[in-house]
Amino acid sequence: MALIIYLVMFTFKNERFIFLLFLWLSALCLKAQPVDYKKVILPSNVSTTDFGERLVQIAWQNYPENAQFKSDIESAELNLKNARWNWLNQIRISGNLNEITIDQDLVTENNLFFPRYNFGLTIPLGIFVNSPTNSRIAKKELDKTNLALKKQMLTIREEVLKAYQDYLMFQDIYKIKNDLAEEEYSNFLTVEQSFQSGEASLSDYKEATKGYNLELESKIIAQNRLIKAKLTLEKWIGIKLEDVN
């Protein structure tokens, strides 16, 4: 394959052709890979050591709209079942018995009627078209509901993992800001003692105070963002982060 590509490149010397050829060969190598939705969100009976996957699992179990999806799927399944068997309601069976058949004492040579009983079966011709069509419609509605559920699974996974990554990021930022604030506070105390002993100027004292206040402000902002990120994550999983096990 590499030799063929080399010969083509050597022969045509055409960048556009080479590019199109590359795309064509790439397309031949690509194969559609179906989504395994059991891996998108792990079943409730499957344990995992990956904390992010555990959060996704909990979020899926607690997400309120899932109850509506479950109800919609059950309704769609019942509609499909009803559509598949509804043709029986269109078939009519009729029959009758004459008086002689019911009361054999009335039988004589002069009043023996034939047939003594008869039955009839009525099947509308439209049943052969309507029943399969209705079944296909019901099947499509069920498929549509299942697709909506799968889309919801992908959305929940994405949102929960994004919220978890934001939480981890703001947690790290807060740790950094907290360390910097502590360093500035330590520096401020040192300068303050020096200022009180006359070893540092008023300008040094003000600069140390300003530096500490700036880092303290950054720490408070980082803490606020961390709290909000935690609340967002907890909104998705439905429980406090500390309660996850």
Image: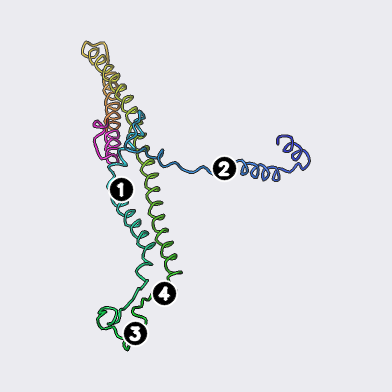
Q: Which mark is residue 31?
A: 2
Residue drawn at (36%, 59%), measured in percent from left and top? Answer: 81
Q: Secondary structure at mark 4?
A: loop
Relative vertical location of residue 45 with respect to residue 135 in this rendering, above or below: above
Q: How many other residues sit within 10 Å of disc 3, few (<14), some (14-19) or many (≥20)?
A: some
Callouts 1 and 3 close, C-beta under 8 Å: no
Callouts 2 and 1 close, C-beta under 8 Å: no
How far is the residue under mark 4 from the one under mark 3?
31 Å
Q: Which residue is mark 3?
A: 113
* Residue most extreme to the front: 109
**The residue stretch that appears in magenta:** 224-244
Decide if residue 4 is on the left or right side of residue 72: right
Image coordinates for residue 217, horizontal then vertical, percent? 27, 30
Quadrant location of residue 168? top left
Q: Nearer the viewer, mark 3 or mark 2?
A: 3
Residue drawn at (44%, 61%), measured in percent from left and top? Answer: 136
- Between 125 and 69, the residue placed more toward the observer is 125
Q: Secondary structure at mark 1?
A: helix
Q: Amino acid at mark 2?
A: Lys
- Between 106 and 126, the residue placed more toward the observer is 106
Relative vertical location of residue 230 with respect to residue 138 in this rendering, above or below: above
Q: Earlier in the sequence, mark 4 or mark 3?
A: 3
How far is the residue under mark 2 from the one under mark 1?
32 Å
Callouts 1 and 4 close, C-beta under 8 Å: no
- Between 170 and 129, the residue placed more toward the observer is 129
Quadrant the C terminus occupies: top left
How far is the residue under mark 1 from the one under mark 4?
41 Å
Q: Earlier in the sequence, mark 1 or mark 3?
A: 1
Q: Is residue 240 magenta?
A: yes
Q: Nearer the viewer, mark 1 or mark 3?
A: 3
Q: Which mark is residue 124?
A: 4
Image coordinates for residue 229, horizontal then vertical, percent? 30, 36
